[in-house]
Image (tube, rainbow, N blue to C red):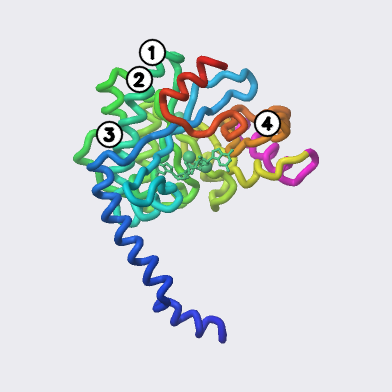
């Protein structure tokens, strides 16, 4: 109780005041950053663990701030979300990814897919007046299956909004859905059945400590068996070592993504990476 009393006054500490000022500053800079083309999309390959083929990649945003240098998405995405700017930023990332997948379907593989992260804020934003992602793909002559939307478990818990309808619309257009950071949220098994999920991404925290006979290996195996029983494919995130990869292959995991294979990279570099494999 004593501790709680002391914490009540912590709102007024200089450190927090400074943090608040930084947020205001960054919100302002994010807005101008989009107009001034300070953002870039990098791509990280997603490797088919059973065949070694790379026909998928995840789009990840990068921000080159004129004064601060490279700012991590982990620090600016939450600010973009709370300010609503994520709607415009997310739309921009999607359009970059759509143009890119059009080129890669011609140059690399006819079934190439790019995953795009979609924040819950984007789902809640009323975009009824706007063209949908499916329309945009259509206009480029691309099938829905050229894009995968990565969502997090929290979104599925969100009842009472149009999230379910949104996911159905994506599914109807052939756009696939991937459940990101699986295992870190609160989604129950019933949600996996209720929504049309195509891929489950095992969170990197479970992959990090993968060693033979570990509880993390047991967890990964259980997720893989369950996902397959429900007709979903599994992607392991944060694969950094050959041992992790081998254990995942043995466990029947479908895809792997991580520094062992490649870091996120510029589009040109991903092309070279795939061509040199
Ligand atoms: P995420 O969606 O879980 O993306 C995977 C993150 O793990 C990426 O960090 C990636 O660079 C990193 N990663 C990949 N392989 C490894 C590995 O082997 N080891 C380790 N330690 N890390 C690895 P990044 O690019 O910094 O992005 C962080 C988060 O920011 C993303 O997590 C995602 O939640 C968010 N984010 C990034 N781009 C976007 C975007 O365009 N839209 C939205 N809404 N969120 C984004
Ligand atoms: Ca993701
Ligand atoms: Ca589907
Ligand atoms: Ca993730």
Q: Nearer the viewer, mark 3 or mark 4?
A: 4
Find out whether the residues at labels 4 and 2 contact each other: C-beta distance under 8 Å: no
Q: Is mark 4 within 8 Å of ligand 1?
A: no
Q: Secondary structure at mark 1?
A: helix
> Depth check: 17 or 247 in front?
17
> Eyeballing the image, is 145 above or below 89?
above
Assign a secondary structure to mark 3.
Answer: loop
The disc, 1 or 3, on the residue closer to the chain's N-terminal end is 1
Residue marked by disc 3: 132
Q: Quadrant of residue 22?
A: bottom left
Q: CA distance from mark 4 to mark 2?
A: 30 Å
Residue bearing mark 1? 106
Q: Residue furthest left?
A: 129
Q: CA distance from mark 4 to mark 1?
A: 30 Å
Q: Main secondary structure of the magenta part?
A: helix
Helix, strand or loop for disc 4: helix
Taking the magenta stretch, the answer to whether it contains residue 127 is no
Which of the marked residues, 4 or 1, is nearer the chain's N terminus?
A: 1
Q: Which residues are magenta?
A: 212-230
Mark 3 and mark 2 residues within 8 Å of each other at the beta carbon: no
Mark 1 vs mark 2, CA separation in Å = 7 Å
Residue picked out by circle 2: 102
Is 61 or 71 nearer to us in this picture? 71
- State left or right for residue 119 relative to residue 229: left
Of marks 4 and 2, which one's residue comes earlier in the chain?
Answer: 2
């Amino acid at each position: 109780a004593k501790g709680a009393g002391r914490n009540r006054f912590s709102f007024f500490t200089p450190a927090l005041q400074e943090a608040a000022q930084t947020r205001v500053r960054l919100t302002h800079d994010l807005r101008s950053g989009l107009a001034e083309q300070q953002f870039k999309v990098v791509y990280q390959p997603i490797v088919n663990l059973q065949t070694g083929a790379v026909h998928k990649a995840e789009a990840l945003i990068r921000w080159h701030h004129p004064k601060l240098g490279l700012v991590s998405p982990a620090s600016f995405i939450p600010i973009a979300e709370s300010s609503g700017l994520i709607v415009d930023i997310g739309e921009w990332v999607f359009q970059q990814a759509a143009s890119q997948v059009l080129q890669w379907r011609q140059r690399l593989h006819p079934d190439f897919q790019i995953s795009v992260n979609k924040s819950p804020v984007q789902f809640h934003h009323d975009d009824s007046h706007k063209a949908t992602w499916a329309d945009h793909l259509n206009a480029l002559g691309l099938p829905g299956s050229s894009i995968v939307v990565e969502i997090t478990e929290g979104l599925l818990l969100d009842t009472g909004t149009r999230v379910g309808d949104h996911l159905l619309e994506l599914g109807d257009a052939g756009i696939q859905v991937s459940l990101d950071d699986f295992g870190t949220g609160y989604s129950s098994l019933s949600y996996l059945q209720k929504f049309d999920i195509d891929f489950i991404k095992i969170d990197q925290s479970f992959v990090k400590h993968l060693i033979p006979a570990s509880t993390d290996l047991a967890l990964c195996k259980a997720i893989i068996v369950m996902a397959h029983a429900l007709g979903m494919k599994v992607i392991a995130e944060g694969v950094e070592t050959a041992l992790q990869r081998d254990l995942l292959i043995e466990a029947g995991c479908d895809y792997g993504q991580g520094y062992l294979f490649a870091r996120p990279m510029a589009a040109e570099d991903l092309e070279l990476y795939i061509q040199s494999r």
